[in-house]
Image (cartoon, grey):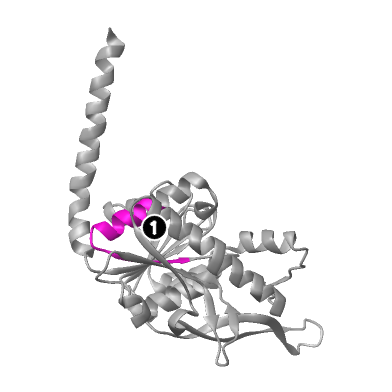
Amino acid sequence: MSDKKSGPKSMETHWLETAQTLSEALPYMRRFAGQTFVIKYGGHAMGEEKLAEDFARDIVLIKQVGINPVVVHGGGPQIGAMLERLKMKSEFIDGLRVTDRDTVDVVEMVLAGSINKSIVGAINKVGGRAVGLSGKDGDLIRARKLRRSVKDPDSNIEKILDLGFVGEPIAVDPEVIRVFDNSRIIPVIAPIGVGENGETYNINADTAAGAIAAALHASKIIMMTDVAGVLDKQKKLVPTLTPKDAMVLLGDGTISGGMIPKVECCLDAVRHGVGAAHILDGRVPHVLLLEIFTPHGVGTMISRG
């Protein structure tokens, strides 16, 4: 008898909580309507089927309420797996894949092909209307060869590293993306750039997302990662940072490892006019909705200060 009574009550409670959540989200929907959010998508959120489906649904909902999402995706593990299948060796320097002419063909095939179309298909499957692009389409991302140098610890002489066809953005054409603003279409962008002579460059997805956000003067850039956000020395989440705060944490080593380039990309985007940058844990279901449409948010936000 008690089970029969508890069923309807618990369901009613569930729907009341859902209605309350929607009501609380309304001010944020109105506030962000018409604004552009650049979302860098990668890590476990992209690799796990349920999280990938949640992400697709969240992107469709964001578009439905009037926000213009621009998805920029990575694909390092998938590229690595394909190179291994093809028995092609892969080397990393400072976290960047050394990309020779043969490797860049594989990178483009995986990023602009299988991964890009998989994300597009997932968004379309749940009711969205996504279109896949790479930075080569419409000369969206003009790029040049990325140059890095290292100092020999014995001789103290700087040596220029040749990373092959690894590039950095020098210009992003925002009009290629803005044509989708007043449509139902959601652009999904693979981080491939085109050089002065038509050569293909492999661009770090975080870097590409930052450059695209800056060119669009986006309201937000959102980096989806495999950690909760920026952590302090006690490994506790730092919910908000100014650029000055972030520089202090970078300088004293609190921000380290793979978080360094993400924070640097966020800082660069904010300096170039992006309203705020967010670093979120993509392993949390519906983390985008939690950040955008709730008062407390999640992850770390870097604002202009």
The quadrant the C terminus occupies is bottom left
The quadrant the N terminus occupies is top left
Q: Is residue 63 magenta?
A: yes
SS of the residue under disc 1: loop
Q: Residue at x 53, y 69 (%)?
A: 112
Q: Residue at x 35, y 65 (%)?
A: 186
Q: Nearer the viewer, residue 70 or 133?
A: 133
Q: Position of residue 208 (x, y in %)?
A: 49, 75
Q: Which residues are magenta?
A: 56-72
Which amino acid type corresponds to the residue marked 1 in the rendered image?
Pro
Residue, disc 1: 239
Left or right side of 263 for 33 = left
Residue 256 in view here: no
Q: Is residue 3 magenta?
A: no
State whether residue 53 is above or below residue 1.
below
Q: Residue at x 42, y 46 (%)?
A: 285
Q: Position of residue 26 (x, y in %)?
A: 18, 53
Which image quadrant for residue 110? Answer: bottom right
Q: Residue furthest top?
A: 1
Q: Residues within 10 Å of mark 1 (few under 14, many from 20)?
A: some
Q: Position of residue 132 (x, y in %)?
A: 44, 67
Which image quadrant for residue 36? Answer: bottom left
